[in-house]
Image (tube, coloured by chain):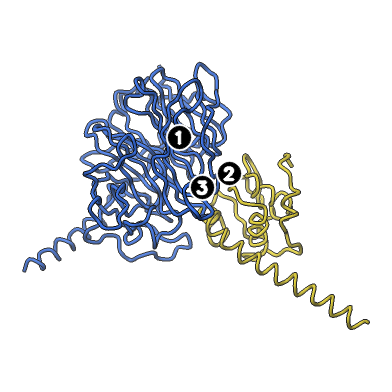
Amino acid sequence: MKITLLFFFLSTIAFAQQSLEESYERGKLLYDDFCVRCHLPNGLGESGLVPPLASADFLEDIKATVHSIKYGIHGPIIVNGVEYNGSMSPMGLDDDEVADVTNFIVNSWGNTSDVMIDEQYVKKVSELKL
Amino acid sequence: MKTKHLFFISLLQVFVACGQTDVNISVPDQTNYSLELVVPNLEIPWGIAYLPDNSLLITEKQGKLIHFKNGKKTSIQNVPNTYVRGQGGLMGIATHPDFEENKFIYFTQSSSVESEESGGNTALYRAILQDNALQDVTLLYKAKPNTKKGTHFGSRIVFDNDGYLYFTIGDRGKRDENPQDLSRDGGKVYRLMENGDIPTDNPFVDVKDAKTAVFSYGHRNPQGMTKHPVTGEIWTHEHGPRGGDEINIVQAGKNYGWPSITYGKNYSGTTITKDKALPGMEQPLYYWIPSIAPSGMAFVHNSKYADWEGNLVVGSLKFNYLERLVIENNSVVFREKIAADIGRVRDVILGADGFLYLAVENKGIYKIVPKG
């Protein structure tokens, strides 16, 4: 009984791990198509113009992160103590794609995240101002 | 012997090519103009055109066409469905040279029509503007295949003095497949008759499998195009990768080199090609390093700005200003920041009233008003 439960537990973890890896890989392709021009391959952005994603405290608020990818973000924000007053338009990604690119960003360049974002989560993030 | 000469000529071209004088951008201490917000509250105004009554047509990237007249915005009805993704949306806008007679307008948008594949590609339409709606909406060109790639749709529209229509499509994120292949759409400047027919003297009409609407090729992503007010030539600029944005004067059948030659690098900083020049490929009139992310382009001519006569103006998405370029003998000799820090400048036109109008993302349309 115990062994069965343990097996079930482990296989669930393995499954989650696998689907995160798949989402991450899809997210990387989307990042290279939609994000890389401004945020750059190393996630460092451009000093004074484009906020970094690598080690960015902004990403600690996962809902705000998903919201900004899904609906765009305009006006002043502070990232790692530096103010950026730019504008990012919504990319027109489907909800599952927003999930993939989020999973890529929050697990790249030294970023780590405990939660995996899925399509359902993105669907629930509404357009209402945060 | 002849081959040897050719070799040296090519070599010479390479040396000449790498010799662009560095022209740093100037920031004036004082400005002799002010900026007036004439159309507020726009999201991404992508293209502007003026009508004979000085009212403005504005494309909003997400698919809306707006007519702005006497301080009022009216949404034009019957715009075909726009495939909005990445850089794609409702983009270029132009009026027919005889608009007063025929009421024809032209626009480009990313679109899913006429292709089996999912995704989208750039389409050119003509329609009659009547009673705040589009009538007789006609698809004149649709690039194929559709793709879900989010980049490099082009797409500006300009008429030349002979009534030919030019429009641009970027490489659609497939730089190794599209720009150098005449049988594929993307990475091209196209030329059509005003009704969408292919001109019989287009450069590739007799080339097997070629897209016969193509006028020039080897382009990356041209989001600026305008007619020179004196020579009538068609000038374009295009986004380079990291560095290597270019200004070109496009000529029939010429190859502008992307991605075989470029002054830019990959976004990661790695090399795309060691070649900046190759025989049979055109050198840019000017290239920007670093990239300014140019969008929109106009010449200042017979305008309200006497000091700027003959200058070229180009929007910068990346650095949030309008760039003024003084050009002598087809060389850039002076660059200046206009409207510094205004925001992402997506388009610029010279209105019939002689004023410059800028489309600024998340702000609206600004007019540059000389002081005094």
Mark 2 crowd level (few <14, some 14–19, many ≥20, 10 Å Cα):
some
Looking at numbered disc 1 in the image, what kind of residue is underneath it?
Gly
- Cα distance between the residues tagged 1 and 3: 21 Å
Q: From the viewer's perspective, is B16 left or right of A97?
A: left
| Residue type for callout 2 | Ser
Q: Secondary structure at mark 1?
A: strand
Number of the label disc, if any, that sits on residue A89: 2
Residue contact between numbered discs 1 and 3, judged by CB atoms under 8 Å: no
Residue A41 shown left or right of residue A61 in the figure:
left
Report the residue at 29% width, 23% height from top: B302
Residue B47: which numbered mark, if any? 1
Q: Is residue B242 above or below residue B227?
A: below
Check disc 3 and give the amino acid type.
Ser
Q: Chain of mark 2?
A: A
Q: Secondary structure at mark 3?
A: loop
Marks 2/1 in contact by CB < 8 Å: the verdict is no
Q: Colour of chain A?
A: yellow
- Picture disc at residue B250: none
Marks 2 and 1, how far apart in space? 16 Å
Identify the residue shown where x is 33% and y is 59%: B181
The label on residue B112 is 3
**A130 left or right, relative to B19:** right
